[in-house]
């Protein structure tokens, strides 16, 4: 059974709803974005080019590929990305019936 993420800020951090801890990264500062959020982002991406990814989300193509392949990224990057998505209106209200913020 998946449990809620035990990050100290998780209880009060609304951004953490879309992040998943990455225990295989061996670092507290790493996480994964929920696959449903990444799929949602992919639907809003006009092309899979470095320029398009940077213009649309403000991240590098390397970061996008890591997220798309469900690999860990820096938590700070993920938090900034979620804030940008929210500011641009691309962040969905909900990404599913169950909570996205889960441990593996």
Image (cartoon, helix red, strand yellow):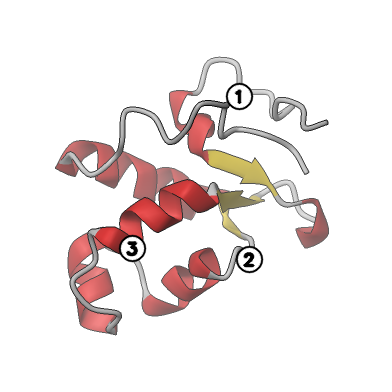
Q: Residue 53 location, x and y as percent? A: 27, 71
Q: Which residue is mark 3?
A: 42
Q: What SS does tag 1 mark? A: loop
Foreground residue among 32 and 8: 32
Q: What SS does tag 3 mark? A: helix
Q: Residue at x 46, y 70 (%)?
A: 63
Rendered position, 72 above or below 79: below
Q: Residue 78 location, x and y as percent? A: 47, 50
Q: Residue 33 location, x and y as percent? A: 53, 50
Q: Residue at x 57, y 57 (%)?
A: 74
Considering only order in the chain, which callout, 3 or 2, is on the residue closer to the N terminus? 3
Q: What SS does tag 2 mark? A: loop
Dot label at residue 77? none
Rendered position, 1 above or below 37: above
Image quadrant for the N terminus? top right
Few, some or many residues within 10 Å of mark 1 (<14, 14–19, 20+): some
Q: Which residue is mark 2?
A: 71
Where, by quadrant of the figure, is residue 73 drawn?
bottom right
Residue at the far top in the pictured view: 12
Considering only order in the chain, which callout, 1 or 3, is on the residue closer to the N terminus? 1
Of tags 3 and 1, the one toward the viewer is 3
Dot label at residue 10? 1
Tally of numbered discs: 3
Q: Residue at x 37, y 73 (%)?
A: 60
Residue at the far front in the pictured view: 97
What is the distance, in whole Å, between disc 1 and disc 2 at their CAs? Answer: 21 Å
């Amino acid at each position: 059974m998946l449990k809620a993420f035990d990050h100290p800020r998780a209880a009060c951090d609304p951004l953490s709803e879309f992040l998943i801890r990455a225990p295989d990264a061996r670092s507290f500062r790493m996480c994964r974005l929920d696959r449903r959020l990444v799929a949602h982002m992919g639907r809003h991406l006009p092309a899979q080019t470095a320029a398009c990814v940077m213009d649309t989300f403000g991240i590098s193509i390397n970061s996008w590929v890591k997220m798309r392949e469900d690999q860990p990224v820096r938590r700070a990057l993920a938090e900034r990305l979620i804030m940008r998505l929210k500011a641009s209106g691309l962040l969905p209200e909900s990404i599913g019936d169950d909570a996205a913020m889960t441990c593996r």
